[in-house]
């Protein structure tokens, strides 16, 4: 069920974003009176072979445009009449251009059409983050609340953190919100370091140059977590916790004979008992109760904890939410650029920095939380805008480069050149897809 929820969220999020992206191309083309032959969510052919397995799950023609949902769930497209893309080559455009064709329009109009999808994704990302900021505010854990210190993961220990350390400075400066510990500016910056208080002394913990690679190897676990007292929030139906009688608001005080205080340590202790029966002593309505539960094979009981550290919420008016939301949205692109810079400098591995559909689905998570769903979708919208702007033929950015050349040089590349560039770009994209979807997962599985 968890896999279905993750896949469902990813599919819904990407369908929304692809639909809006293609609508950006569609709307700008229609505005300039360019004929649009097709508007499809998903492909109605075996991508990238436009003449193989041509059928749609649903389609309807309205005016000159056929609207539909394809069978191949990978992106989507608009077929703009008179434009060389994955559905049309130079030979199909051998006749004289007609007034309603893409190629007959001035370069500046074609440029706007090509940027339409990217602009729509940016607007979508900014709008999502603005509305989330306005409706939810910013929930944060004050640094002063992390009074029990932190628990490092294996990576955190390798960096130099120790259990119970209190992080007091980041890059030599005091901080007020604990989430600043995970700031991309710090984790991807040069010469970043944390200062911790340990047994009455201050110790600097540097961020290693290859931190992104090591963080990727670790998986979704954070490199440090606040040591937080906790109670049971929600219990998954059918889970070991539910079968064993654990209830919301229970406070777990003992695991077998070991005292339980903080959730991160409790997680580690459960992992060491994966697949084994345990005795939990819980405090329930002021009384102590012992429960017999078997930990699952992954080291989980199947409940969600609620931290007893006090979080704070910062609320904004709608006017204040717009610049805050825009900053969050464009921060995603800034982080992408920084990550690319790390790759080009050799400080991060390209292989470990890319992820396919499974990694995206995992980021959405195994439970359907609408706030997190829209947060992830807003982030993906900005990533989609950034990736499509890359100057690779077959992507919008490749078309933009050729159009800018035409506007500067006063002449456009030949249709045959554009077709060949499209083929080269498509081969690059297919190679990348094969690497991300097939080769990279195999390399990760065998530990390379």
Image (cartoon, rainbow, N blue to C red):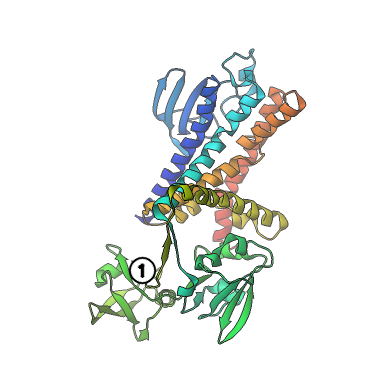
Q: Residue 398, position in %: x, y? A: 66, 35
Report x, y in % for residue 98. Answer: 60, 13
Q: Secondary structure at mark 1?
A: strand
State whether residue 305 is above or below residue 291. above
* Residue 105: x %, y % from top left: 62, 20
- Residue at position x 48%, y 50% in the image: 320
Question: Please, is residue 354 above or below residue 232 in the view?
Answer: above
Residue at image location 69% in from the left, 34% down from the top: 401
| Percent of width and height locating residue 214 | 60, 65
Quadrant housing residue 279: bottom left
The correct choice, above or below, for 107 with respect to 295 in the image is above
User: Can residue 319 be seen from the camera position used here?
Assistant: yes
Quick one: quadrant of the N terminus? bottom left
Residue at numbered disc 1: 306
Q: Please indicate whether residue 310 sits to the left or right of residue 326 in the image.
A: left
Find residue 419 and report its image quarter: top right
Q: Residues within 10 Å of mark 1 (few under 14, many from 20)?
A: some
Q: Visible in this render: residue 438?
A: no
The number of numbered discs placed on residues in the rendered structure image is 1
Q: Is residue 134 left or right of residue 408?
A: left
Occupied quadrant, residue 93: top right
Name the foreground residue: 64 vs 430.
64
Q: Quadrant of the C terminus?
A: bottom right
């Amino acid at each position: 069920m968890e896999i279905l929820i993750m896949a469902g969220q990813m599919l819904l999020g990407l369908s929304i974003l692809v639909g809006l992206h293609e609508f950006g191309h569609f709307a700008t083309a229609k505005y300039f009176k360019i004929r649009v032959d097709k508007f499809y969510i998903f492909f109605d052919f075996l991508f990238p072979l436009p003449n193989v397995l041509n059928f749609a799950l649903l389609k309807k023609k309205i005016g000159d445009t056929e609207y539909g949902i394809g069978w191949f769930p990978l992106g989507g497209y608009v077929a703009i009449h008179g434009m060389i893309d994955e559905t049309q080559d130079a030979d199909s455009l051998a006749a004289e251009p007609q007034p309603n064709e893409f190629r007959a329009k001035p370069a500046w109009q074609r440029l706007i059409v090509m940027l339409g999808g990217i602009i729509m994704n940016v607007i979508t990302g900014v709008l999502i983050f603005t509305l989330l900021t306005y409706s939810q505010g910013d929930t944060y854990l004050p640094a002063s609340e992390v009074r029990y210190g932190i628990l490092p993961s294996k990576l955190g220990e390798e960096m130099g953190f120790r259990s119970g350390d209190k992080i007091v400075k980041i890059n030599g400066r005091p901080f007020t919100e604990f989430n600043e510990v995970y700031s991309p500016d710090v984790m991807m910056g040069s010469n970043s370091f944390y200062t911790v208080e340990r047994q009455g002394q201050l110790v600097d913990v540097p961020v290693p140059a290859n931190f992104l690679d090591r963080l990727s190897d670790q998986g979704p676990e954070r490199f440090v977590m606040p040591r937080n007292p906790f109670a049971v929030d929600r219990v998954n139906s059918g889970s070991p916790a539910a079968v064993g009688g654990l209830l919301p608001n229970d406070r777990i005080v003992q695991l077998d004979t070991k005292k339980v205080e903080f959730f991160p340590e409790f997680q580690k202790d459960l992992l060491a008992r994966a697949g084994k029966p345990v005795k939990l002593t819980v405090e329930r309505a002021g009384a102590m109760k012992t429960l017999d539960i078997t930990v699952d094979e992954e080291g989980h009981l199947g409940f969600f904890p609620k931290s007893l550290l006090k979080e704070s919420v910062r609320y904004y008016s709608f006017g204040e939410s717009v610049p805050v939301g825009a900053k969050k949205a464009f921060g995603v692109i800034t982080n992408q650029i920084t990550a690319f810079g790390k790759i080009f400098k050799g400080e991060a591995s390209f292989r470990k920095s890319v992820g396919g559909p499974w990694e995206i689905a995992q980021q959405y998570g195994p439970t359907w939380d609408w706030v997190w769903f829209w947060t992830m979708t807003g982030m993906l919208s900005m990533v989609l805008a950034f990736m499509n702007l890359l100057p690779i033929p077959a992507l919008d950015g490749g078309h933009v480069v050729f159009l800018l050349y035409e506007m500067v040089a006063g002449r456009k590349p030949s249709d045959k050149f554009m077709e060949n560039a499209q083929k080269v770009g498509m081969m690059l994209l297919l190679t990348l897809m094969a690497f991300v979807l097939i080769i990279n997962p195999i390399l990760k599985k065998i530990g390379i």
